[in-house]
Image (tube, rainbow, N blue to C red):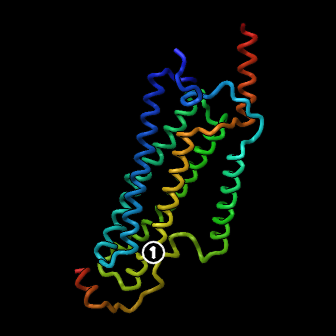
Amino acid sequence: MADPHPGENFPDSTERSSGTPRWVKVFAAIAVILGLLAAVILLTGEGHGPGRHAPSGSSERHMPPGMTRALS
Amino acid sequence: MTMTPGVRKLALTAHVTASVGWFGAVTVFLALAIAGWTSQDAQMVRAAYLAMDWGAWFVLVPFAVASLITGLVQSLGTAWGLLRHYWVLAKLLLTVVATIVLLLYTQTLELLASVAAATDPSIDELTLLRTPTVVLHSGAALLLLVVATVLAVYKPRGMTAYGRRKRTRESARLTSGG
């Protein structure tokens, strides 16, 4: 029994594509741009690793009353 | 190595389950990240980061790896192949990138969770937790998974050069075989 929706669940054997489709070029361009953006952030930022989240040394512990109550 | 129809449906079920599970987990993660970023309740903020750290290792990572593996099985066991069609290749790259970034990001989540778990965090440490970074990463992951889903459903046309060569060879073999 022939597949009722050819190409939907199986590759279309009659596909005649001979070049790179436009959507692939757009997809690749976006990927390259995002990749370059990520590289710039990683290389020029203060650091993209978890270390940038580390608190900078000890700090005086002054907590407003509301915060103290919330943490208890 | 083409799978029988029954096995193919089983593999497809596994892949869809893993992928949808991953999507759902990231959505919950995003909600927790928003809570951690915006809530004024310190207990809520700390709980969100503790939950995200645990959830990343026990929910996100397993679903991501399962989606990747089942996707590989699906592609290699069907006529679509892994490298023959651009939509399959694009989905593979998206999944690999998302999984790698997730694994690397667990370090950040562990650090944030350690701050959240501190018995007497300072104001600076609590302020540290109110960061949009997890929201941004979760949002980006969600977008990436949506794109992968669109590719999987619409299967846009386009064969790679490898796919075209493979198809030509297979056609020639069928023709010569009579």
Corner quadrant of residue B27: bottom left
Q: Residue under mark 1: which chain is it in?
A: B
Q: Which x, y percent locates residue B85?
A: 65, 36
Lateral position of residue A20 relative to residue A50, left or right: right
- Please indicate whether residue B82 sits to the left or right of residue B174 in the image: left
Disc 1: which residue: B131
Q: Position of residue B63 (x, y in %)?
A: 43, 47
Which residue is drawn at the image coordinates 52% and 60% (left, top)?
Answer: B140
Picture quadrant where residue A47 is located: bottom right
Residue visible at 41% across and 89% down? A59
Using the image, determine if residue B119 lies above or below residue B170: below
Q: Secondary structure at mark 1?
A: loop
For the point 63% across and 27% down, the residue is: A12
Q: Quadrant of the C terminus of chain A?
A: bottom left
Front position in the image: A64 or A58: A64
Q: Which residue appears at 46% of the width and 85% of the height? A: A57
